[in-house]
Every structure is written in structure tokens, then in C-alpha cells.
Amino acid sequence: MESGINPWSGSQSVDIDRLFAEFGIAPVEDEVTTLKSQPPFFRRKIVVGHRDYGLIVDAINSGSRFNVMTGFMPSGHPHLGHLMVMREVVWHIEQGGSGYVAIADREAHAVRGLSWDDCKKYGREYLECLYALGFEGTTYYQSENEQLKDLAFEAAMKINFSDLQAIYGFSQETALAHADSVATQVADILYPQLMEGPAPTVVPVGIDQDPHIRLTRDIAHKMRWFTVLDQGTVISVRSKNAPAHAMDAIAAAFPGSKRYEGHVDIPGADCLAVSEKVRAVEVAEGGYGFITPSSTYHSFMQGLQGGKMSSSVPDSLFWFDEPDSDVKRKVMGALTGGRMTKEEQVRLGGEPDNCPVYLLNLFHMVSDDEELLDIRRQCLSGSLLCGACKKATFERVKEFLSEFKEKRDAVSHMVV
């Protein structure tokens, strides 16, 4: 695969620096400096990269319209590894975004072979978790959304198998249903703009999902009717197989413009203003006018045993419905950044940045930055030993899971 990433793998490692350099993902720090209030996932550098997130920052700061969209493949019970994306979605909704969440049951059925009944059952659990965290907005199952299926068909007309081979490594043995699930994911990302009109849309994902984002950004561009170019003396609106009536509407929208067979030239105009007006005309004439979607990428939290967190390695994570006794065993048995002996720990201090237990606190279990900093200081100084840290961490996890269960029970009626 051109990216070296399989979005459906549960065990791969991702070279973030190489991915950023090779595919143009930008560090997110500079983009979020103007936000009035940064959430923990920005402050603590958990979200590390982005594509066009500046559009979302501008929308948040100006109070203008934007969407936040993501999807979950219901291939099993929701667990710790899903929590970050859920919290990112909810935070963007709190900033004024319109929320959309897809339950990717067609993908789970095609790629993982799950029955439709299992997809429905697991999907309900994901939705309960989202509502418990404060999600408000639109949710749907891919298999039940007819508008989504129509959009996926239109998107598929712009995708060829060489794209799928290059991006995903598909071969002659790849099932057509798997390829169809990719087109459906493209439609998922564009669906908010289908429903509410063109608007900036951010998709929070793990870094391993970037192939889907790159494909969708390319398809969103291909589905546009027009390209707007600044030619210096004129702004040229060029047709990309736009229907004749749409070209007529463009010419009529800009008095003084000069109409040619495949383009309209507009003298003395501002490129950005022309682009926005062209988009409005495109939508009015029956086109999509999609704004290329944005994305943010969060780094992977290590599994409790080190390495990548994966449901295929049960001791690397815990599920939200898991008994306290099992969760305690996993947390207390977790790998740490401690030294070989107590004496070395006291003398040399621990290594929190390489410690799954510390990272569990950093990502999710300690909301107060000063408290987290104090844990880090004590670890580095050797005054906080791993056993005591694990016990305190388990108590935080236990409290979180108890409260989360209560919230899920309280919102279960919202899942319909």
C-alpha cells in the first residue's frame, strides 16, 4: 500500500513522522493557538496532526456553521480505545458544530463478517456511550440510510480500482463488498453537507484512518462541477463536466464576465468571493458544492501491556462493561515505566512517557492538568512507586466506569 497503513488492522504500528512528511499532514499546535479554550486533547498533545483544521478553528471563533462527523465499526463491544474520538466529537459539538455519527455496519459485515444482528447490538452500545458523554446530533446505521447509499453510488463513480490498489492494497482477491464499504465511508464523511449544505466538516480519527480521509478529500474535489483559478487579470471559472444550464447560471451571476465554451472569465474580481458564489450557484443548480473535509489525528495510547491497544489482545485494554475485578487485574498487571527494583526507582526515578499507566491518566483519567503534572513530578523524582500509582489509577478507572454506566443507563432510551 502506498501509505503502509491498513485501516482495518488491529496490530500494526504507524510511523507518524514518516506519514506526516509523506502525505502532508501538518502539526496541529499552530492551528489551535487562537482557540479561546483548548480541550485536554490539544493541551496535552494527544491530537497531533490535521488537514485544513484552520477552517474549523475559524468557524468556532466566528460562530459560523460547521460539522463534526465520525464513524464506528460495530465489530465488538466499545472499549477504552474508542473513548478519545468520542470525546473529540462531543467537544466540537459543544463548540457549536452539528454532530453526525455513522454506525458502519455495512463495513463490519463486509470486512469482519459480522451478522446484521450483531452489528445492530454492538452499534447500540456505541450510541449509548456517545449519548452518555453528551453527544447531540444525527446518528444512523449505514445499512438503513437510503440517502447515504445514493451518495455512495455517486461517489463510487469517481473511484477506480487503481485508487483502491494504491491506497489500500486491494487485490484480485478483495471482495467487491469491501470496496463498496470504502465508497460508503466516503459518503459518510460527505453526508453532513448533503443534508445541511456545504460547510466545513471535521473528521476526528486515529492516525491509521488517514487513507479514508485522503480518498474522501480527492473524491469531494472530483464531485465538484467547477474549478476557480486566479489568472491574474481575471478569475476563471472552469467547468468539470458541468451541465450547460449551470454554465449559463455562472455567466448570469457575474455581470461583465466573458463566457467561453468551457469556462467563464471574470475581470477585476476577488478569487475567494467568486469561489463562494460559484459554490452557491452549483448547489442551486443541483450540484453538491462540497467543501473539502478537514481532519484531526490523535496519537495512539499504548495498550496496558505496551504496544498497540487492540481488542485481539484483551489485556491491552478494558471494555466499558467489564467487571471491576477484571479491570483491576489488568491495571495492576500493566506494564510500567518503572525501574527493575525499588532502589533503582527511588534513585533514578520512573519514565512516565513510556508508561501505559501514566498515559491512561494523561489521556482519560486525570482531568486536572496540575494533578497530572504532580503525578509526573513524583514519578520522575522516584517518590511515587509503580504499585501505589497503579492502585490510585485503578480507583480513578473504577469511579469512571461506575459513573459511565449510570449515564449509559440514563440515556439508553435515546438509542432508537
Image (cartoon, rainbow, N blue to C red):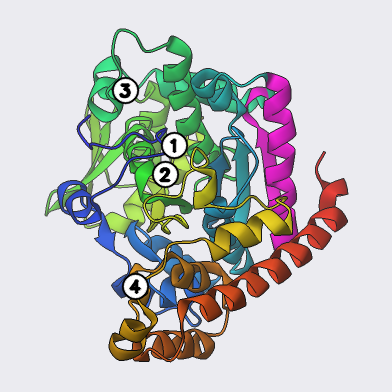
Q: Magenta part mainly helix, strand or loop?
A: helix
Which tag, 3 or 4, sits closer to the chain's start? Answer: 3
- Residue at 35% x, 26% y is 242
Whether residue 357 is situated above or below residue 128 in the rendered picture: below
Task: Look at label 1 and name its amino acid.
Answer: Glu
Q: Secondary structure at mark 3?
A: loop
Residue annotated with mark 1: 282
Which tag, 3 or 2, sits closer to the chain's start? Answer: 3
Magenta run includes residue 141: yes
Residue annotated with mark 4: 353
Distance from disc 1 to disc 4, alpha carbons, whole Å, reads 50 Å
Q: Residues within 10 Å of mark 2 (few under 14, many from 20)?
A: many
Distance from disc 3 to disc 4, alpha carbons, whole Å, reads 53 Å
Q: Residues within 10 Å of mark 1 (few under 14, many from 20)?
A: many
Q: Secondary structure at mark 2?
A: helix
Residue annotated with mark 2: 279
Task: Look at label 3 and name its amino acid.
Answer: Asn
The one nearer the camera, 205 or 394, is 394
Tell me which corner region of the image, top left, top right, bottom left or bottom right, holds residue 388: bottom right
